[in-house]
């Protein structure tokens, strides 16, 4: 069963290298585990969208939940999906624009088209509020 998880977590002082290293690990592991998704970091919080088989997602969420580089992992949504919204992204780093005014537009245009409106709204709100 294909599922989609969306969570946020807290990581107040990660270096650029830490974030790069998380992305490199994801790029290495995720294709082998059939995981795809996107990752946003605003300097204080992560938001991650993960898609894959339910069993693989559960296993990955356990690893992520035990990762000392962040804390307070909080699942915003988990549901089954018919198809992946971003099948070609092993783990896409999405950047939050400097200008608060342009954040919404920039992100809206970069997010996968297949995202349902609820999930899209949560991701855009995360980027705009922080
Ligand atoms: C915010 C965040 C997101 C992460 N996302 C992934 C991911 O998508 N895939 C992954 O394999 N590890 C991810 N990790 C890293 C895992 O917690 C864990 O360190 C890693 O899977 C261990 O892999 P390794 O045994 O190959 O080093 C993430 C960690 C953090 C803090």
Image: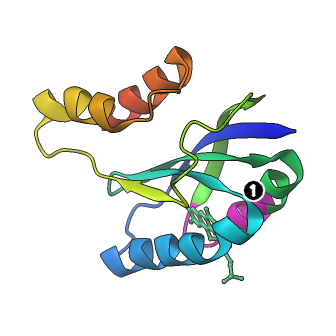
Residue 12 seen from this side: yes
Quarter of the image where ligand 1 sits: bottom right
Is residue 79 positioned above or below 68 on the image? Answer: above
Answer left or right for 73 relative to 24.
right
Q: Position of residue 124 (x, y in %)?
A: 37, 29
> Viewer-proximal residue, 67 or 119?
119
Q: Which residue is mark 1?
A: 61
Answer left or right for 61 relative to 43.
right
Name which quarter of the figure residue 49 lies in.
top right
Is residue 50 positioned above or below 26 on the image? Answer: above
Looking at the image, which residue is at 14% across and 31% down? 102
Q: Residues within 10 Å of mark 1 (few under 14, many from 20)?
A: some
Answer left or right for 118 relative to 94.
right
Residue 128 seen from this side: no
Q: Position of residue 117 (x, y in %)?
A: 50, 16
> Viewer-proximal residue, 45 or 23?
23
> Viewer-proximal residue, 21 or 108?
108
Answer left or right for 7 relative to 114.
right
Looking at the image, which residue is at 54% across and 17% down? 118
Asked if residue 52 is among those painted magenta in the image, a careful observer would answer: no
For label 1, the SS is helix
Q: Which region shows up in magenta?
A: 60-70
Asked if residue 64 is among those painted magenta in the image, a careful observer would answer: yes
Can you name the residue that lies furthest to the top here? 117
Q: How many marks?
A: 1
């Amino acid at each position: 069963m294909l599922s989609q998880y969306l969570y946020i977590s807290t990581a107040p002082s990660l270096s650029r290298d830490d974030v790069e290293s998380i992305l490199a690990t994801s790029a290495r592991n995720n294709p082998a585990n059939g995981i795809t998704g996107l990752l946003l970091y605003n300097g204080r919080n992560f938001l991650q969208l993960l898609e894959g088989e339910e069993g693989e997602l559960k296993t990955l969420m356990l690893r992520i939940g035990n990762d000392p580089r962040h804390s307070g992992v909080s699942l915003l949504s988990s549901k089954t999906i018919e198809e992946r919204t971003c099948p070609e992204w092993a783990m896409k780093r999405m950047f939050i624009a400097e200008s608060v005014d342009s954040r919404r537009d920039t992100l809206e245009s970069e997010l996968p088209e297949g995202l349902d409106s609820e999930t899209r709204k949560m991701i855009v709100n995360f980027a705009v509020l922080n």
